[in-house]
Image: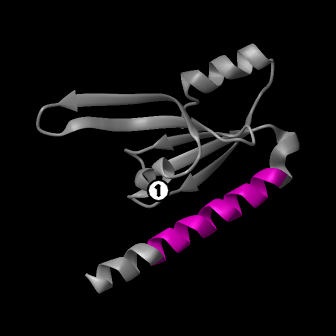
Amino acid sequence: MIKPEYILLREKKDEVVFSSMTVEVPEDFDRFMKDRNFVLRCSESSYSPETDIEYKNKVYQTKQGFFLYLSLTERMMVIYYGEDQLNELTLFIRQLFKQLKNATNNDKRTERKN
């Protein structure tokens, strides 16, 4: 996957090279991400009256300073981080997917009640 321009600009500005980790994500992952406390830094989208705004990809920044590049067309997420953040990233990613699992289970429970 090609590194997004936003990440390249951040690397140049901060004089740092980010390491990356690729993660497969489920189809509805973007909806889950909207409920997290991340800052949307940039996105690529298109518009048509029939479908409204359709996002192709988004770059989020976390409080820990990670950048999450979410490719909605490929259902992949690439996490960009400083190599010195690897231990913190490991904890972050486990917690994120634990929250995703809990949210998915809660959605399934709600669907059964209806």
How many marks can you see?
1
Instruction: Describe the colour scheme in one phrase.
Output: one colour
Name the residue rendered at 72%, 15% in the picture: 12
The region drawn magenta spans 88-105
114 magenta-colored:
no
Name the residue rendered at 63%, 26% in the picture: 7
98 magenta-colored:
yes
Q: Is residue 19 left or right of residue 25?
A: right
Magenta-colored segment: predominant secondary structure: helix
Would you place residue 22 above or below residue 59 in this image? below
Q: Quadrant of residue 17?
A: top right
Q: Is residue 14 left or right of residue 112?
A: right
The location of residue 51, given as percent across then percent down, is 17, 40
The N terminus - image quarter: top right
Name the residue rendered at 50%, 43% in the picture: 70
Name the residue rendered at 31%, 85% in the picture: 112
The location of residue 90, given as percent across then percent down, is 77, 58
Q: Nearer the viewer, residue 66 or 72?
A: 66
Q: Nearer the viewer, residue 99 or 16?
A: 99
Which class describes the residues within 10 Å of circle 1: few (<14), some (14-19), or many (20+)? some
Which residue is denoted by mark 1 in the rendering? Answer: 32
Would you place residue 85 above or below residue 98 in this image? above
The location of residue 60, given as percent across then percent down, is 57, 37
Does dot 1 land on a helix, a strand or a loop? helix
Type of amino acid under label 1: Phe
Residue reaching furthest right?
84
The C terminus - image quarter: bottom left
Q: Quadrant of residue 94?
A: bottom right
